[in-house]
Image (cartoon, rainbow, N blue to C red):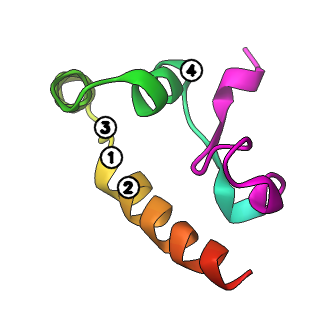
Amino acid sequence: SGFNPWNFAHVLSKKNYPLFRLLDRNIQIITDREHRLFDQGTMDSRAAYSEECLDEGYTCDWQKLFTLRDELKEDYKKA
């Protein structure tokens, strides 16, 4: 299978946070579907995906990404 660009999600957008464009913490490896849901999905669509994941035997914890996003925003203010 391998990776494609959709597997590398910027938690903070490259456009709005250019200083963190290449910061390792700002780039998370996720599935292409998770990337689309993170960038463009609704809370309901993310919750539905999380339920699908549970049915398949694994978890998708959106809160980790949102918490990281908040932490990175605070760090960016200090940069």
Q: Which residue is at 57% across, 49% downward?
A: 11
Q: Nearer the viewer, mark 2 or mark 4?
A: 2
Q: Which residue is at 33% across, 46% downward?
A: 62
Q: Nearer the viewer, mark 3 or mark 1?
A: 1
- Image quadrant occupied by the N terminus: top right
Residue at the spot of label 1:
62
Query: At numbered mark 3, what does the secondary structure look like: helix, strand or loop?
Result: loop
Q: Are discs 2 and 1 less than 8 Å apart at CB?
A: yes
Q: Nearer the viewer, mark 2 or mark 1?
A: 2
Residue at the spot of label 3:
58
| Residue at mark 2 to residue at mark 4: CA–CA distance | 17 Å
Is the residue 66 above or below the residue 38 in the image?
Answer: below
| Magenta stretch: helix, strand or loop mostly | loop
Residue at the spot of label 4:
32
Instruction: Say which amino acid is labelled 4.
Output: Asp
Instruction: Say which amino acid is labelled 1.
Output: Trp
Label 1 crowd bin: few (<14), some (14–19), many (20+), radius 10 Å: some
Using the image as rendered, state which of residue 22 and residue 29 is in the foreground: 22
- 32 to the left or right of 76: left
Query: At numbered mark 4, what does the secondary structure look like: helix, strand or loop?
Result: helix
Instruction: Say which amino acid is labelled 2.
Output: Phe
